[in-house]
Image (tube, rainbow, N blue to C red):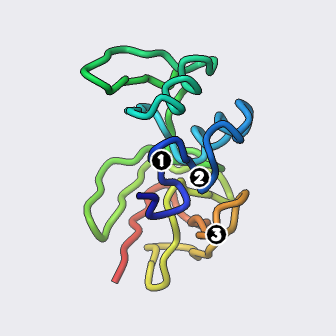
Amino acid sequence: MQTGFASFWDGKAFTKPIAEISPEKMHEYFDRYNIGWIIAHSEKSKRYFDQLNGVVCINEWKQLKFYQVQRLHSFFLAGAGELVARDANRLVFKAVLGDSITLKYHYLPGMQVTEGTIDPVFIGDDPNPFIQLRGASQNVILTYR
């Protein structure tokens, strides 16, 4: 059952049949959603990922195949920094660089940042906005209430 835009289930990903997603678009999704691992059970999905460059099957168990996406991982779409702590209602970053930071987390009304402004920003075909920070210091605490 697909529950959100970035869901992956039974040969469907990002609300589309997986076979309709170009390799370039899939790699764009890998980057946007920080995807590093994939578990597939449907034959459609396994055929797709078996042929996709930059994705390696690392194990199989019964009908499941486990894949590793070979790419650098980051929590930033724009800017840079280090995520040092997280829990249900709080993210803590240090060494944040950039005038305008876009995080690989979705925005929710009620989010607050210790310094600067926080805004929703829509990227690609995702109907849910991501988090954009402006005027943030090098150490950022983002909370949700």
Compute the Cα span from label 2 to label 3.
11 Å
Point out residue 68 in the picture as x, y percentages from the top left corner.
Answer: 43, 23
| Mark 2 crowd level (few <14, some 14–19, many ≥20, 10 Å Cα) | some
Q: Nearer the observer, disc 2 or disc 3?
A: 2
User: Could you say which is closer to the camera, residue 65 or residue 58?
Assistant: 65
**Taking 109 as reference, is 16 left or right?**
right
Amino acid on which disc 1 is placed: Phe
Compute the Cα span from label 3 to label 1.
16 Å
Point out residue 44 in the picture as x, y percentages from the top left corner.
Answer: 54, 32
User: Could you say which is closer to the camera, residue 97 or residue 54?
Assistant: 54
Label number found at residue 38? none
Q: Which residue bears the numbered disc 2?
A: 14
Q: Earlier in the sequence, mark 2 or mark 1?
A: 1
Point out residue 86 in the picture as x, y percentages from the top left corner.
Answer: 29, 56
What residue appears at the point 32 percent right and 15 percent down from the top-left corner?
59
Q: Nearer the observer, disc 3 or disc 1?
A: 1
What residue appears at the point 31 percent right and 17 percent down from the top-left corner?
60
Q: Earlier in the sequence, mark 2 or mark 3?
A: 2
User: Could you say which is closer to the camera, residue 51 or residue 90?
Assistant: 51
**82 shown above or below 120:** above
What residue appears at the point 26 percent right and 61 percent down from the top-left corner?
87
Label number found at residue 8? 1
Compute the Cα span from label 2 to label 1.
7 Å
**Taking 38 as reference, is 137 left or right?**
right
What residue appears at the point 41 percent right and 58 percent down from the top-left corner?
1
Examine the image and state in which quarter residue 102 appears.
Answer: bottom right
Q: Are marks 3 and 1 in contact (CB under 8 Å)?
A: no
**Taking 4 as reference, is 24 left or right?**
right
Q: Are marks 2 and 1 in contact (CB under 8 Å)?
A: yes
Label number found at residue 127? 3
